[in-house]
Amino acid sequence: MSCQKDSKVNDEAEEMNLELDVIRFDKIFAQAEPQDLGELKTRFPDLFPSQIPDSLWIEKMNDTLQNEINNEVLKVFPDFDTEQKRIERFYKYLSYHFEFFKPPNKVITLAEEVNYRNKIVLSEDGFPLISLDNYLGKDHKFYQGLPQYIAFMQDKKFMISDLAKLYAEEILLRNEERTFISDMIYHGKVLYLKDILMPFETDTQKIYYSDEDLKWAKENETQVWAFFVENKLIFSTDNRLADRFLNLAPYSKFYLELDSESAPRIGQYIGWQIVRKYMEKNPESTLDKLIETEAEEIFKASNYKPKS
């Protein structure tokens, strides 16, 4: 799938030619009148499913809440220049490291209904649809009903991370093993691909952490690993471990008094460090080899032992 290349910011990737057209459909729809609907459907057929009658689109054009969403999106994104440059950089690295990949020639932005589970989706033609209503900032009034740990991720600084995650999950095959270590290393691979595909962004952006979360994870890595080992969790097939240490949650669940102070999804962080250690100790390993290598082999070859 790829030859071995530097995972850091590099001139070869940065200097690649890439033309990306950003279509602000959110603005176009916000300014449209009912009589414009036919033209919009002709221009953007992928955005108007045939099973939805015109009356619902007209109702949406006149809807008070939709108009408020349009206005709030426009306040945060009066233009898209900075985001476009970041997206273009991401696609340069994706094309550089995975030469089979043909980047899209356009991105379409939307103003939808604040569905944090579908912030970015790929169209059938392979270009991204980005719902800007999910990137207005954690304190925005639209997110007041969301749990704080989810609202935290509703920020444009995480847009590239969301995009990279989408492609990383497309590239990676989910291991059929259901052990805790295999799940940790799967997430570790996703995060390592983010290292490769978005080296111009921070570790906090890659893993959706605050500075405090990352500090806690680094300072407590040794103790967390010791907890996993002492409680025989590494090769456990207990599916409850995912909710405790891998899935979206306000913090990790050790069932100790310190839980509320812990970084969330700490199993993902540990898996990330294992994969990083594996690639460090095996510099000859290519990305395609990493992707294909089973979790247990990565774990053993990494010789992962966090420092005290």
Image (spheres, rainbow, N blue to C red):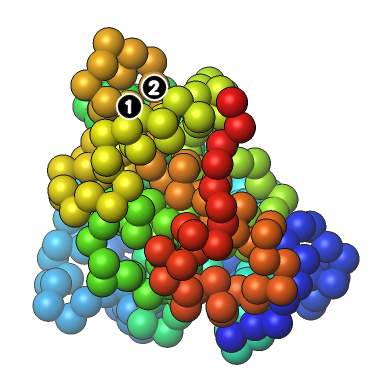
Q: For the residue labelled by badge 1, is the local secondary structure a helix, a strand or a loop?
A: loop
**In the figure, residue 173 lies in which quadrant?**
bottom left
Q: Are marks 2 and 1 in contact (CB under 8 Å)?
A: yes
Residue that protrudes farthest toward the bottom in the picture: 100
Measured from the top left, where is residue 44 in percent x and y?
A: 39, 77
Count of numbered circles on the image: 2
Task: Work out which quarter of the rendered image holds the C terminus and state it.
Answer: top right
Instruction: Indicate the amino acid at tag 1.
Output: Tyr
* Residue in the foreground of this view, choosing between 98 and 85: 98
Question: Where residue 80 sits in the image (x, y, percent)?
Answer: 61, 52
The correct choice, above or below, for 27 with respect to 229 in the image is: below
Whether residue 236 sits left or right of residue 14 in the image: it is left
Which mark, residue 251? 1
The residue at the point 80 percent across, 75 percent down is 16
Q: Secondary structure at mark 2?
A: loop
Nearer the observer, 254 or 123: 254
Q: Residue at x 77, y 66 (%)?
A: 6
Say if residue 280 shows up in the picture.
Answer: yes
Residue lying furthest top in this view? 257
Q: Is residue 37 visible?
A: no
- Horizontal and vertical percent position of residue 183: 33, 56
User: Quadrant of the rendered structure where residue 166 is?
Assistant: bottom left
Q: Amino acid at mark 2?
A: Ser
Q: In this rendering, would 252 be left or right of 92? A: left
Residue of label 2? 262
Q: Kindly identify the residue that appears in the image at 56 percent across and 56 percent down.
A: 302
